[in-house]
Image: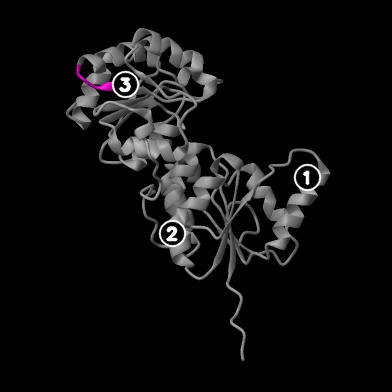
Amino acid sequence: MTEAPEPQRLLVIKHGALGDFVQALGPMQAIREAHPQAHITLLTTAPFAELGRRSGYFDDVWIDPRPRWGLKQWLGLRAKLISGRFGRVYDLQTSGRSTRYFYLLPTPRPEWSGVGLGRSHPHANERRNLMHTLDRQAEQLRMAGISRVPPPDLSWADADIGRYKLEARFALLVPGGSAHRPEKRWPAERYATLARALIADGIQPVLIGTKTEADLIGTIKAEAPKAADLVGRTSFFDLAALARHAVAAVGNDTGPMHLFAVAGAPCLVLFSAASDPTLCAPRGQQVRVIRSSKLEDVSVEEVLGALALINQL
């Protein structure tokens, strides 16, 4: 009896951060649909491993140790990559780090979709860094032979949000973001004023953030006591479920806003000159962007007006 051939073994590299990972979900789905019988492994960082596992796109998920200078760590990662016996690699990270992983593998190296010399399926567009993330990755996959790339999907990500005991009508507020990029944050006092305006309109503000943003969110909560403080209490799956029931989401250019947009919340994203929405903003029919050189120049009235255009609050 002839044994069935071993399935093709593929590796997908995508580390993060959250917004980048969410925007890569469409390309991940496309890779799975293009290789339905393949054994596909995701190489990612620990925060996104469970998203990868529950997406249904992967047969295995590996945690990337992201070695720095230690030779032992680099040799360990090399041995791990070799053990995978991958026939093709889709590098959706295309960072300096992931590009170096190509050279960890012995020759003959697997087929490789990514950037850099020697790749079998390079993303050969000198202007790739001037493209929106979704367009860039779709073009990268087209050059690797995958013509259909769907938009990111989070319909499979769900959770029971009843434990939060929220009011029937609520809006998600994301006042935080990278601590080392304060210029990307709308002032906390504006979020507090917005929260009070929502409360006056019968909408409960729900404050979303990590434990490192507890002081920031505490400041807003003090000015709007009826707001729900969910700092440090939400998984990615909770956020997706919250987005499906929210009347709106308002936040800075930060990861949760990408997740909310994909999950279906009407979103308003605030951009300063520190980042370019043409390259990285969430996309969707119910997504609007306000951009100002300095976010402190954006008024609460402007935000409320933009919200009214995407959702009749």
Which callout, 2 or 3, points at the residue further toward the start of the chain? 2
Q: Nearer the viewer, residue 120 or 188?
A: 188
Mark 1 crowdedness (10 Å alpha carbons): few <14, some 14-19, many ≥20: some
Q: Main secondary structure of the magenta part?
A: loop
Label 3–label 1 contact, CB within 8 A:
no
Q: Residue furthest left?
A: 312
Quadrant of the image containing the N terminus: bottom right
Q: Is residue 89 left or right of residue 256?
A: right
Q: Which residues are magenta?
A: 201-205
Q: Could you say which quadrant of the image residue 2 lies in?
A: bottom right
Q: Is residue 278 left or right of residue 78?
A: left
Amino acid type, mark 2: Ala
Mark 2 crowdedness (10 Å alpha carbons): few <14, some 14-19, many ≥20: many
Q: Which residue is mark 2?
A: 30
Mark 3 crowdedness (10 Å alpha carbons): few <14, some 14-19, many ≥20: many
* Label number found at residue 205: 3
Taking the magenta stretch, the answer to whether it contains residue 203 is yes
* Label number found at residue 73: 1
Label 2–label 3 contact, CB within 8 A:
no
State the SS at label 2: helix
